[in-house]
Image (cartoon, grey):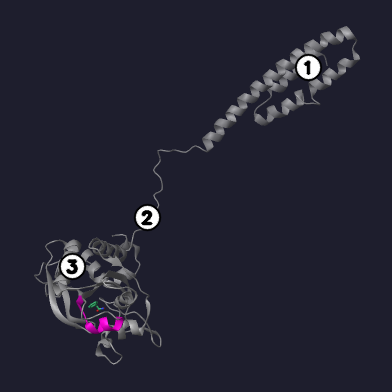
Amino acid sequence: MDISGLKEKVTSEISSVKNIEDIKKVKVFLLGRKGLFAEFLDTLKTLDKDLRKEAGRSINELKVWTENKVKEVETLYEEQEKIKREAASWIDVTMPGKTPLIGKKHPITQTLEEITRIFVSLGFSVAEGPDIEIEYYNFEALNIPGDHPARDMQDTFYVAPGTVLRTHTSPVQIRTMESQLPPVKIIAPGAVYRCDHDISHTPMFHQVEGLLVDKNIRFSDLKGILSMFIGEMFGKDTTLRFRPSYFPFTEPSAEVDMGCVICAGKGCRLCKDTGWLEILGSGMVHPQVFRNVGYDQEELTGFAFGMGVERIAMIKFGIDDIRQFYYNDIRFLSQF
Ligand code: PHE
């Protein structure tokens, strides 16, 4: 092959290229270490000096031209590849995204947090106790001995002899007073358990206990604090009624009703036509309870209350079946 034959070969090889792979192969074929140009230059050795110089220059010129041409074609196909790649991975940033389902706090959690917020703003701190409680804290220390009829008020789950699932948050009163000196100003939110299940009872529900102990605490302080709480929770115009009642650990005791938020006192299904909704039990701490924890009952007085959180949530959200809270039906829960 002479030099014009080589040029023809080069041109036809390059023009046959259709894609990036082709040009890579052609590049090796023409310019590689054992490629056409290398082979051609090798044959120069057989020529004599003058001819070799002449031919060498022409071949090198052709080689440089080929290198440029190959580079040019290579760049072209690389560009095309890049455009293809980008098209394949193109993201339309204007498309609406997939909105992840965002969880919400359970209505009972929301209510517990709201109750806690209000009492913390009134200077109460939060205390806690165990759900699995010894009988002494759940009953005896609260002035409810074993044969006391008040034990029947609460259908107790026994876990082991002497150990119960707490039936109320009141044992936290005892634990707190045992572990700290007066004055005491706490609330104790948490789960409680009773063997009971119908439209207005679930075996597990929640209470918020309150306890304020100091010198000169009077029943009017209890009324004042609870009125402020109800006003915050349900609105300033909500009416309250203190009804004499009985708890072994308070004396005097009162149950507190609020005016029905649905019928405003006229009577409806929620308030069972009474116009009132019972929301908590309360009273002045019984001197025997102070004695049980080693507090000076001559010097100290205090009030305590315990409210049902589900009850408050039902009133707040207008729900008439307490069991709804625990079916875990997302259609129900997502409404809050
Ligand atoms: N522990 C009582 C109950 O569960 C409520 C209560 C608490 C009453 C504190 C008086 C004082 O019914």
Of tags 3 and 2, which is closer to the observer? Answer: 3
Return the mark for residue 6.
1
Relative to residue 259, is residue 80 drawn left or right? right
Asked whether the residues under the numbered discs 1 and 3 touch, taking CB atoms below 8 Å apart as contact, a structural biologist would say no
Residue at which label 2 appears: 102
Q: Toward which corner of the image does residue 281 lie, by quadrant?
A: bottom left
- Pinpoint residue 92: horizontal percent, then vertical percent: 44, 38
- Identity of the amino acid at label 1? Leu
- Identity of the amino acid at label 3? Ile
* Depth order, front residue of 218/61: 218
In terms of secondary structure, where does tag 2 sit? loop
Q: Which residues are magenta?
A: 281-293
Q: Residue at x 18, y 67 (%)?
A: 225
In terms of secondary structure, where does tag 1 sit? helix
Asked if 156 appears above or below 58 in the picture, the reply is below
Q: Quadrant of the N terminus?
A: top right
The earlier-in-sequence mark between 3 and 2 is 2
- Identity of the amino acid at label 2? Ile
Tell me which image quadrant ligand 1 sits in: bottom left
